[in-house]
């Protein structure tokens, strides 16, 4: 069935370092891959997304890469700051649907 | 530009009771999706409403039902509550005209079933 796996489950970095979170998806017809940031007790916030016709997208310190052949996509955060600390979820929309299938989340901690 | 809103913010019910949660989509959006987020997990898709009809449904029992109104707002109803229904219920809105993929979440309703 439709599935999204996410690694690692926790990630601790020093302020200024880079952080990378990786996801794989099962449905080869998936065509939209958003990333959400969720702070404690708050709503998931869309931070970046990528469509299947694009290999990479960047927005300031955040970038996402997509490898359709391997069914992998990754979130890269450079020059991390303490306010980047949160749970990050990857998601995918399988073919012929509009439902988001979420990964299990990565808890990112950025230490000053 | 009003974002997605949900009510109530918190709710406590007992087993067997029924609950109704409400969602107003972002201005300009016509599609509402509902998700259940258990503690420490990612959101799970319940169903999606467009043009006042349920368009897609996830793996949730018939105890979960919904409705969409002509103004695009939506309700989620859960009957015969179980302890396992305790979770954060999120609604997300999107625009079918724009492809329907990009979904923005509301703040959620935290439901506790005792």
Image (tube, rainbow, N blue to C red):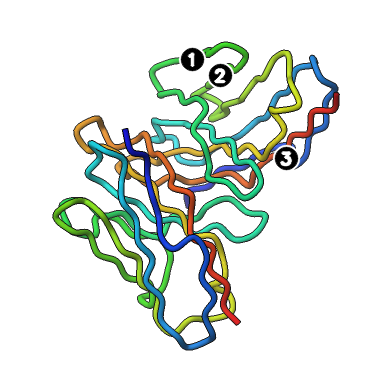
Given this view, does label 1 or label 3 mark the residue nearer the observer?
3
Q: Residue at x 59, y 35 (%)?
A: A37
Residues flagged by tags 3 and 2 on a common chain: yes
Q: Residue at x 25, y 54 (%)?
A: B73
Residue, disc 3: A107
In the displayed structure, would residue A99 be above or below residue A110?
A: below
Marks 2,1: beta carbons within 8 A: yes
Which residue position is annotated with label 2? A65
- Vertical placement of residue A33 versus B88, above or below: above
- Tell me, yes or no, whether dots 1 and 3 are on the same chain: yes
Regarding mark 1 in the picture, which secondary structure is present there?
A: loop
The quadrant in which the C terminus of chain A is found is top right
Instruction: Find the distance from the CA under tag 2 to the CA under tag 1.
Output: 6 Å
Dot 1 or dot 3, earlier in sequence: 1
Q: Chain of mark 3?
A: A
Please name the residue that numbered disc 1 is placed on: A55
Which quadrant would residue A24 be assigned to in this image? top right
State the residue in front, B12 or A45: B12
Instruction: Name above or below for residue B90 compared with residue A85.
Output: below
In the figure, A44 relative to B111: above or below?
above
Image x and y of residue B34, in percent: 39, 56
Between marks 1 and 3, how big is the CA–CA gap?
25 Å
Quadrant in which residue A84 is drawn: top right
């Amino acid at each position: 069935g439709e599935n999204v796996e996410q690694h690692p489950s926790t990630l601790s970095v020093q302020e200024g370092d880079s952080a990378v979170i990786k996801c794989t998806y099962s449905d080869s017809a998936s065509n939209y891959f958003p990333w959400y940031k969720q702070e404690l007790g708050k709503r998931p916030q869309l931070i970046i997304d990528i469509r299947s016709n694009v290999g990479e997208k960047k927005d300031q310190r955040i970038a996402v890469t997509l490898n359709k052949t391997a069914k992998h996509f990754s979130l890269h955060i450079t020059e991390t700051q303490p306010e980047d600390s949160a749970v990050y979820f990857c998601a995918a929309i399988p073919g012929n649907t509009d439902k988001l299938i979420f990964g299990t989340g990565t808890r990112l901690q950025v230490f000053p | 530009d009003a974002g997605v809103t949900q009510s109530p913010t918190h709710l406590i019910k007992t087993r067997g009771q029924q609950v109704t949660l409400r969602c107003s989509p972002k201005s300009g959006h016509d599609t509402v999706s509902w998700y259940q987020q258990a503690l420490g997990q990612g959101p799970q898709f319940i169903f999606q409403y467009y043009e006042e009809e349920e368009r897609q449904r996830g793996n949730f029992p018939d105890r979960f039902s919904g409705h969409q109104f002509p103004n695009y707002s939506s309700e989620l109803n859960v009957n015969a509550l179980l302890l396992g229904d305790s979770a954060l219920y999120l609604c997300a809105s999107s625009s079918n005209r724009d492809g329907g993929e990009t979904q923005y979440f509301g703040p959620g309703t935290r439901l506790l079933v005792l």
